[in-house]
């Protein structure tokens, strides 16, 4: 019997009838985009769900982040992490800002907060940390540093939909936080994203920048982009929001099964269980120490692929090693991130992954242990 192909993730979708029902009003109204009723309803519901003060919706997470940095009118240098998706670094560079890479913590893979202050210069204007894999950054220490030096903090919270820290929505930390609703994330609107923020003035800027910088019918006072969320996308978001708690609960069972199978396996580091954090079980990255384990990350990757199981080398390469930045950054300045990126493997995790398949994946990994 041919075994099913398993990819690293699989998009969650609402029942077909539910979506069809949700989009009926759009046919009646002929209002397809530009802050329509579905868009506005989703804003209200997400604000509630995420436990944040204000929210703006966007076409995708990347545009949300890029336009937030623009709205803050930053200049000079921005301290960030190279252990992330391309978007974080590109958003900084596309704003004409210089990313300054801070190394990461070897256990939660977020920015190592003890290394931030050494990187601050008189050109530094902001910090852009990433809650990578859904792990929460040391938000208290980042806030202390930002206050001390007068820096803005914009979190890339793309992986932390629904995560809470000390019972507070993760999007309420920093000056702003970006969420991604891409099809591959825990919660999706097909493509989509949002920014949560405190300052109402920033909200006005964001409103304009996602709509060409148009202030009113006869005033365009910002060099904006076009990044508005349309009604069909918002309808998908409304449907998926009704199911997201159930999705996260299913993910929890899978993560627990992975832990039961892999805990104590010599040379394999599992994701941390963080204190005071209500997680969303978004990713399951393992870090393989080939000296103790007997096989490399790449060997496990290949062995799984032979069984039609497709893990991903998230995040390899580091963003500061990308071809488009050749010669601009020194990867040896972030040695922990470099070390982890060569050893990390993100194994399949999605709500409908069966526990039998989780066991099978773990057996294959264990077979690589020598
Ligand atoms: C997905 C992702 C983004 C970008 O989100 P899009 O919605 O795909 O534009 C940014 N940062 C990180 C860490 C991500 O994983």
Image (spheres, rainbow, N blue to C red):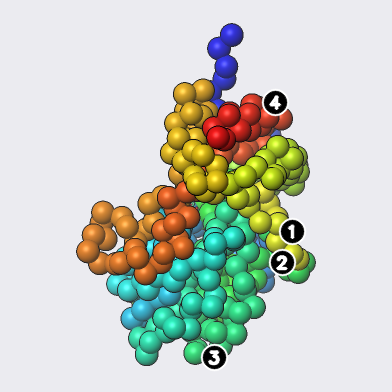
Q: Residue at x 58, y 75 (%)?
A: 174
Beta carbon at label 3 within 8 Å of ligand 1 = no
355 vs 28: above or below: above
Badge 3 local density, few (<14 within 10 Å), some, or many (20+)?
few
Q: Earlier in the sequence, mark 2 or mark 1?
A: 2
Proximity of marks 1 and 3: CB atoms separated by less than 8 Å: no
Task: Name the residue carrying label 2.
Answer: 165
What's the distance in space between the residues labelled 1 and 3, CA to CA?
A: 29 Å
Q: Residue 130 at what x, y percent from top left?
A: 52, 64
Q: Earlier in the sequence, mark 3 or mark 4?
A: 3
On the rendered structure, is 13 left or right of 327?
right
Q: Earlier in the sequence, mark 2 or mark 4?
A: 2
Badge 2 local density, few (<14 within 10 Å), some, or many (20+)?
some
User: What secondary structure is marked by label 4?
Assistant: helix
Q: Is residue 333 visible in the rendered structure shown here?
A: yes
Residue 144: image tag: none
Q: Nearer the viewer, mark 4 or mark 1?
A: 4
What's the distance in space between the residues labelled 2 and 3, CA to CA?
A: 23 Å
Q: Is residue 71 visible in the rendered structure shown here?
A: no
298 vs 45: above or below: above
Decide which of 343, 355 is in the foreground and name it: 343
Q: Residue 235 at what x, y percent from top left?
A: 60, 44
Task: Name the residue carrying label 4.
Answer: 356
Task: Name the residue carrying label 3.
Answer: 148
On the rendered structure, is 345 left or right of 255?
left
Badge 4 local density, few (<14 within 10 Å), some, or many (20+)?
few
Decide which of 22, 5 is in the foreground and name it: 5
Q: Nearer the viewer, mark 2 or mark 4?
A: 4
Q: Residue at x 43, y 50 (%)?
A: 342
Proximity of marks 3 and 4: CB atoms separated by less than 8 Å: no
What's the distance in space between the residues labelled 3 and 4, CA to CA?
A: 51 Å
Quarter holding the C terminus? top right
């Amino acid at each position: 019997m041919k075994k099913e192909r398993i990819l690293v993730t699989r998009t969650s979708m609402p029942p077909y009838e539910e979506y069809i029902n949700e989009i009926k009003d759009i046919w009646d109204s002929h209002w397809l985009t530009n802050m329509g009723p579905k868009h506005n309803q989703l804003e209200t519901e997400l604000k509630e769900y995420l436990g944040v003060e204000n929210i703006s919706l966007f076409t995708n997470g990347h545009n949300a982040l890029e336009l937030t940095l623009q709205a803050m009118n930053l200049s000079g240098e921005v301290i960030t992490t190279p252990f992330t998706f391309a978007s974080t670094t590109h958003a900084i560079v596309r704003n004409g800002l210089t990313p300054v890479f801070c190394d990461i913590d070897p256990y939660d893979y977020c920015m190592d907060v003890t290394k931030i202050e050494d990187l601050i210069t008189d050109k530094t204007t902001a910090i852009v940390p990433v809650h990578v894999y859904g792990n929460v950054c040391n938000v208290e220490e980042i806030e202390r540093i930002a206050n001390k030096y007068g820096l803005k903090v914009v979190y890339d919270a793309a992986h932390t939909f629904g995560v809470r820290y000390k019972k507070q929505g993760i999007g309420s930390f920093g000056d702003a936080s970006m969420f991604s609703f891409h099809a591959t994330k825990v919660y999706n609107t097909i493509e989509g994203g949002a920014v949560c923020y405190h300052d109402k003035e920033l909200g006005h800027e964001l409103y304009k920048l996602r709509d060409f910088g148009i202030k009113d019918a006869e005033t365009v006072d910002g060099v904006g982009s076009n990044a508005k969320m349309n009604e069909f996308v918002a309808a998908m978001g409304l449907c998926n929001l009704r199911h997201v708690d159930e999705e996260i609960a299913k993910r929890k069972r899978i993560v627990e099964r992975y832990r039961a199978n892999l805990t104590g396996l010599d040379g394999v580091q599992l994701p941390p269980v963080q204190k005071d954090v209500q997680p969303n079980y978004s990713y399951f990255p393992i870090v393989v120490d080939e000296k103790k384990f007997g096989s490399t990350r790449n060997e496990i990757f290949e062995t799984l692929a032979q069984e039609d199981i497709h893990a991903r080398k998230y995040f390899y390469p580091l963003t500061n090693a990308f071809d488009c930045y050749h010669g601009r950054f020194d990867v040896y300045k972030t040695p922990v991130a470099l070390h982890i990126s060569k050893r990390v493997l993100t194994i399949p995790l999605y709500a409908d992954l069966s526990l039998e398949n989780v066991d099978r994946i773990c057996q294959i990994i264990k077979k690589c242990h020598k």
